[in-house]
Amino acid sequence: MPETNLREVVARIAKLVKGLPERVLSVEKGYAQLATELSELKERLDISPDPSDSSDFKALSRDDVVKIDNEDPRMFLENTTFQLEEWLEALHEILQEKADKNYSGEWVRGDIEGQVLLASGGGWRSGKLRLSMEFLPETEETKD
């Protein structure tokens, strides 16, 4: 009798595990569908996108020169005019000091392995992550 109960339990577990990948996929599709619906709802409600989410931002190259307002309290470089490479090096030093003495620039070089679930859908995507700086030029509308 106990052997029969054990077989039934194993059969039930096997049946539950068999459907697990489909359930995970269903949840991912659900997230993607929610992201799509949220985007459509924003459009219907005429909600202006956050300017920081704009696709008009352009990634700067390491050789580009940046000038920051002298009074910006978030500035962590001595000079307010610098190449992006200098900013990345200073950021690297801060990360090395604050995060982990063994930090060797993974975030700056793009050596961080990870996954991203984009709001636009498509499920989880594997790849590499890195820090960068982007620039959104002023337009006549934003100057007013």
Image (tube, grey):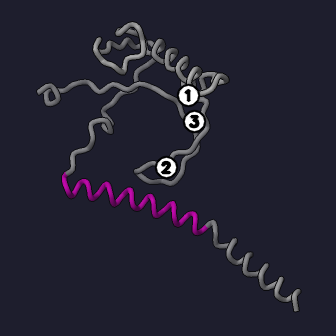
Q: What residue type is disc 2 on?
A: Leu
Q: In what quadrant of the picture does the C terminus appear? A: top left
In this rendered view, identify the residue nearer to me: 96 or 112: 96
Asked if disc 3 and disc 2 are in contact, CB closer than 8 Å, the reply is: no
Q: Which residue position holds label 3?
A: 128
Element at label 3:
strand
Badge nearest the viewer, 3 or 1: 1
Q: Amino acid at mark 1?
A: Trp
Considering only vertical position in the picture, is 48 above or below 112? below
Where residue 76 sits: x, y (%)?
A: 42, 16
Q: Label 1 neighbourhood size at 10 Å, few (<14), some (14-19), many (20+)?
A: some
Kindly identify which residue carries mark 2. 117
Image disc number at residue 107: 1
Residue 99 in the image, given as x and y percentages of width and height:
58, 27
Left or right of 46? Residue 90 is right
Q: Which of disc 1 and disc 3 is earlier in sequence?
A: 1
